[in-house]
């Protein structure tokens, strides 16, 4: 498992650049700001939404549940001799990053207050543990929310492009 909610990798495929873009276009629909996926049958919509511009794309997976840490996927396709090379980056949405910064700030503030209160009392106090638990909980939310979805998207793109991951 990754320590940071970020992916940056390359796929190589025997498909041409135009075939890769064509296959991707078949799997994405335009971005909508309000989508009621839970009201539709899963077969009524495509698995991803986003846009393609030339040889670059920006997509995210359509899910029927809430996950604030859903990865935003950007990629660029380049012809590399007889093969194509796809550079893929996955990262959290800006809103999720801002939420985590807020979470860390609140955790540190609450932790400081608890530690100041606990410092008046000699001996062990559970107040020393509160900031650590809050920080670990926020980190776990981000990592597990992101890594599960990024693994699904990574496998989907690998299968779609018939590619192999390269360094």
Image (tube, rainbow, N blue to C red):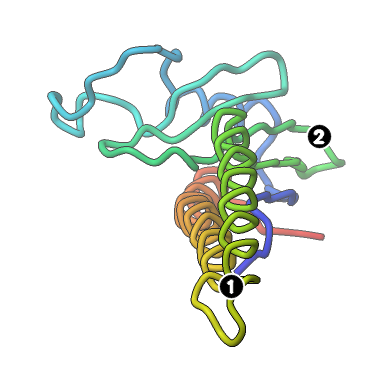
At which x and y percent is residue 117? Answer: 58, 63
Q: Dot 1 surroundings within 10 Å: few (below 14), some, or many (20 or more)? A: some
* In the displayed structure image, the side of residue 32 where residue 164 appears, left or right: right
| Quarter of image, res 120 | bottom right
**Nearer to the camera, 13 or 37:** 37
Query: Is 151 on the left-hand or right-hand side of 16?
Result: left
Q: Does 61 appear above or below 115?
A: above
The quarter of the picture where residue 68 lies is top left
Q: Quadrant of the C terminus?
A: bottom right
Closer to us: 127 or 48: 127
Q: Is residue 141 above or below residue 62?
A: below
**The N terminus is located in which quarter?**
bottom right
Q: Nearer the viewer, residue 140 or 124?
A: 124
Measure the C-alpha gap from mark 1 to mark 2: 55 Å
**Residue 121 in picture, x, y percent from top left:** 58, 77
Instruction: Note whether 69 is above or below 113 in the view shown.
Output: above
Tell me which residue sits at (52%, 57%) in the image: 147
Secondary element at tag 1: helix
> Helix, strand, or loop for circle 2?
strand
11 to 38, vertically: above or below: below
- Tell me the residue at 43%/35% (across/down): 61
Which numbered tag is attached to residue 79? 2
Residue 28 is tagged as none
Q: Is residue 74 left or right of residue 60?
A: right
Q: Residue at x 62, y 48 (%)?
A: 109
Mark 1 and mark 2 lie on one chain; the one further toward the N terminus is 2
The disc at residue 128 is 1
């Amino acid at each position: 498992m990754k320590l940071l909610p970020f992916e940056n990798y390359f796929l190589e495929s025997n498909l041409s650049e135009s075939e890769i873009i064509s296959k991707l276009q078949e799997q994405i629909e335009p971005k909508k700001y309000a989508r009621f996926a839970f009201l539709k049958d899963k077969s009524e919509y495509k698995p991803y939404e986003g846009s393609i511009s030339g040889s670059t794309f920006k997509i995210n997976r359509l899910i029927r549940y809430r996950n604030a840490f859903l990865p935003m996927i950007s990629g660029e396709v380049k012809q590399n001799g007889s093969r194509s090379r796809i550079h893929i980056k996955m990262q959290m949405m800006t809103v999720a990053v801002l939420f985590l910064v807020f979470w860390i700030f609140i955790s540190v503030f609450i932790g400081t207050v608890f530690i100041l209160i606990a410092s008046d009392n000699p001996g062990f106090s559970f107040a020393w543990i509160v900031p650590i638990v809050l920080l670990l909980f926020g980190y776990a939310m981000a990592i597990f929310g992101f890594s599960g979805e990024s693994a699904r998207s990574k496998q989907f793109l690998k299968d779609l492009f018939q590619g192999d991951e390269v360094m």
